[in-house]
Image: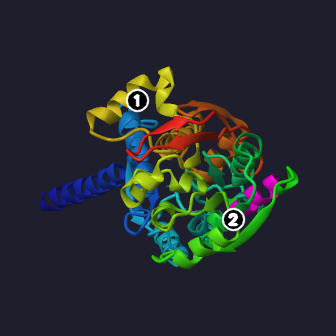
Amino acid sequence: MKSMVKKSLIGLGVSAALMGTSIAQAEIKIALAGPVSGPVAQYGDMQFIGAEMAIEQINKAGGVNGEKLVGVKYDDACDPKQAVAVANKIVNDGIKFVVGHLCSSSTQPASDIYEDEGIVMVTAASTNPDITLQGYQMIFRTIGLDSLQGPVAGRFIAEKVKPKNIAVIHDKQQYGEGIATAVKSTVEKAGYNVVMFEGITAGDKDFSALVAKLKKNNVDFVYYGGYHPELGLILRQSKELGLQSQFMGPEGVGNKDISSIAGPASEGLLVTLPPSFEKDPKNASLVQAFKDKNQDPTGPFVMPAYSAVQVMADSMKATGSTDSEEVAEYMHKTAFSTPIGNVKFDEKGDLTSFNFVVYNWHQDGTKSEAK
């Protein structure tokens, strides 16, 4: 009798252990990798709230094949070395799906690890073309390339602004220098004179020497490739030192904090950004969901991050699998209806279609489409 009781208890223990395993498996983890800390953490916030909203809404609708999605945040501080450490941590944590990274210089080395380890990565923010030029099958993005954004900016400069002397400045990083180079090439092909093409050091605070050089070269238009902390200071110091040039930058400067840094000097800045997806009537209920949580749906990476989660979840549902290679294969051959429109990936994992729009930035942190 004791033996039977003991066997029954052992059987219950085994069943409980198996149930525990089942419960542990009844969730699908998605790593959310980007800057929680550092000077561009505001952009990380955009990515995180977009991805987290997608996870929340997908779970409310029943999850994925009966399983719940769980987002796990990782802070890479937009630093390439830390991004590699984060990627290795994600591998060790056994997570097979990633939304991130944000900065191209972080995404590039991390993508090497994800491809080698069979992890699906979708970046909602990294625009440098080199990331997807390696023939990887596990790497995707839900945002356009600098090879698209740069020419949009360059053509606007050439056709609308028509300056006399152009300076193209960048922060010497993969994203900033890459898009600056694309702009330079576009305006030069249009017959315009780029009198300065040089880099500053990210993190610098004093740009008086740069401003003096811009004045000396009679620069009336400055394109800046990089992020808002440095451009905000350049704008402010340019105004203080009497430089009258107009400025333009990519989505990396389109952050309300640039108005906090530059103040009135941010008025009239030109910025290329993804379209205002929050204004699409099809996204009205989603926009309201963000507002109900006191979150801002207007950031350039919010809807792309939401869409990154959605395409992975839709692919898991369609294949009935969480095998990352099966999911990636499905993503490559399928079109998805998302908040950023119809998403279709090419063989490199890039979007087959994406538009950038030129906006006028205002000192109150709002924007209006430039004409």
User: Is 248 placed above or below 93 here?
Assistant: above
Element marked by disc 1: helix
User: Is 190 placed above or below 228 here?
Assistant: above
Asked whether the viewer can see residue 112, the reply is: no
- Give the side of residue 53 with respect to residue 88, left or right: left
Q: Give the range drawn in magenta.
A: 180-187
- Could you say where residue 139 lies in the image, as x and y percent from the top left? 65, 55
Q: Residue furthest top?
A: 281
- Could you say where residue 70 lies in the image, as x and y percent from the top left? 37, 49
Element marked by disc 2: loop
Q: How is the image coloured?
A: rainbow
- Could you say where residue 196 lies in the image, as x and y percent from the top left? 73, 69
Q: Earlier in the sequence, mark 1 or mark 2?
A: 2
Badge 1 amino acid: Leu
User: Is 290 placed above or below 71 here?
Assistant: above
- Could you say where residue 305 lies in the image, as x and y percent from the top left? 50, 45
Q: How crowded is mark 2: few (under 14 residues within 10 Å), some or many (20 or more)?
A: some
User: For the stretch drawn in magenta, what is the main secondary structure?
Assistant: helix
Q: How crowded is mark 1: few (under 14 residues within 10 Å), some or many (20 or more)?
A: some
For image coordinates 53% across by 39% down, the residue present is 307
- Give the side of residue 96 with respect to residue 199, left or right: left
**Quadrant hosting residue 290:** top left
Badge 2 amino acid: Asn
Quarter of the image with the C terminus is top right
Cα distance, mark 1 to mark 2? 47 Å
- Residue denoted by label 1: 286
Quarter of the image with the N terminus is bottom left
Would you say residue 182 sits in the magenta stretch? yes
User: Is 249 placed above or below 211 here?
Assistant: above
- Give the side of residue 54 with respect to residue 156, left or right: left
- Residue denoted by label 2: 218
For image coordinates 62% across by 62% down, the residue present is 225
